[in-house]
Amino acid sequence: MIYCELTQGATTLNLSMGGMEKNSKFYDEGITDVSDFNFALNGAWARLEDADISFLRTSLTGVNINNREFTIKVFLENDWNIFNGSAIIIDNDGVEVKMRLKSTDYTTELLSVDVNNQVIPRVFGSVTHANPLLLDDTIYKYHCAYGTPTTVFDDGLSVAFTDNSGADGTMTLTNAPVGEVSFNVATTTTYLAQIATILSLTLDVTKANTNVVNFFQSTQINAIDALSTFCEYTENIFYITGTTLYIVAKTSFVAQYAKDAFEIMKDGVDIQEQSIVKTIRAEWEVRKPQINPTILGTQTKSLSVNILSDGSTIDITPFDEVNANIQTILNAKKVQIQKSNVLITIADIHVLAIGDELSFDADYASGTLFITGVNYNVIDAQTTVTGLGNVTWS
């Protein structure tokens, strides 16, 4: 059984499929159809894909159908909230009204801009030879990218400067520069903490891989896209519940689910070995002073790990310039890539979340999988999960 509370302004309608009493409330008959609820990774973001719910037009008495947006809470017999957010009318034939459930969109950008609409770079961790933003060329004043400068360079040569980062976030060179200005700069602000602040969310990293990177962000990017890219790089996923941003490592599990038996349908199960690559490679550039002539040049660096397989290569862009940190990430990716893709359909609706660990035991295979996708077929009462599995073949 599925229930919903549909709210517009001060009016809330309690509706169900068939008309039922629950929690001392009567939920009127009104729900006519519900699509599958599919929670899947969009990049590294675990979120609800498009889902629809239909109502009898006559059950929506008291609300303004011409005002297309509603707040909706959808929950099941066991009181599990399968969705809590917005619903928008997408079809109304006079008999039924179909609504599309809509997850929150986050459009906030990662970097701030100054009064001249210049994007202000931001440092995370500690970086070397980054290029600061020039604020005033008459007094050689630069923005410190929200960090503390330790050394400033002019064409790779150390020069004198005044650090005002604690006062107004700037620094001023003692003399006019003759070439390219760069600086070594550091901050204790982590990438994830800053993104959570920008999105006005509380950060939970209790199940995350390390969130410390050494990175200089100088180009504008949507904060949620930056978060997704970072999590893909560090082998994390993330999801947002209410006002909390959860980061979950693919090698850590939120909970352990083990049932005595699963009804795993032969036609609904697809367990297969994932095609794995031979090499995962990281290539990046660092700025290095050069002599004769004295300039600030660029050095290309690379690292890789090998896996015995088909000879293809995955290239990744690191968020760091520390070799040891990048090597750790490559090794973590190697472990994940060598896992199997597993899909299991289970009878009934089970409260499973992306990031949970699921134990399974079929006729020909058993093991555990890290859930990366969950599909709820409410009408047929089935739960389908997909994930990365450690499989033992029978």
Image (tube, helix red, strand yellow):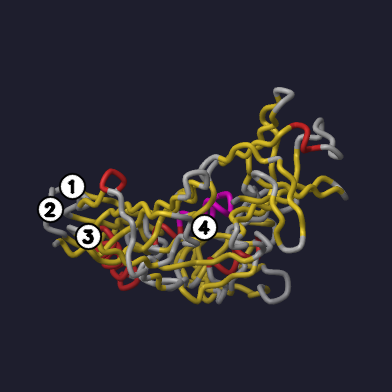
Instruction: Quote the CA–CA distance across marks 4 and 3.
Output: 24 Å
Which residue has dot 4 on it? 227
Element on which disc 4 rests: helix
Q: Nearer the viewer, mark 4 or mark 2?
A: 2
Q: Is residue 208 left or right of residue 199?
A: left
Residue 89, quarter of picture: top right
Region of the chain picked out in magenta, as a range: 218-229
Residue, disc 3:
338
Residue in the picture at 66% in, 51% down = 3
Q: CA distance from mark 3 to mark 2?
A: 10 Å
For the residues labelled 4 and 3, say whether their Cβ atoms are less than 8 Å apart.
no
Q: Residue at x 52, y 47 (%)?
A: 378
Residue receiving disc 1: 312
Marks 1 and 2 close (CB-CB < 8 Å) = yes
Q: Residue at x 66, y 33 (%)?
A: 98
- The answer to whether 21 appears left or right of 180 in the picture is right
Q: Quadrant of the C terminus?
A: bottom left
3 vs 2, front mark = 3
Residue type, label 1 = Ser
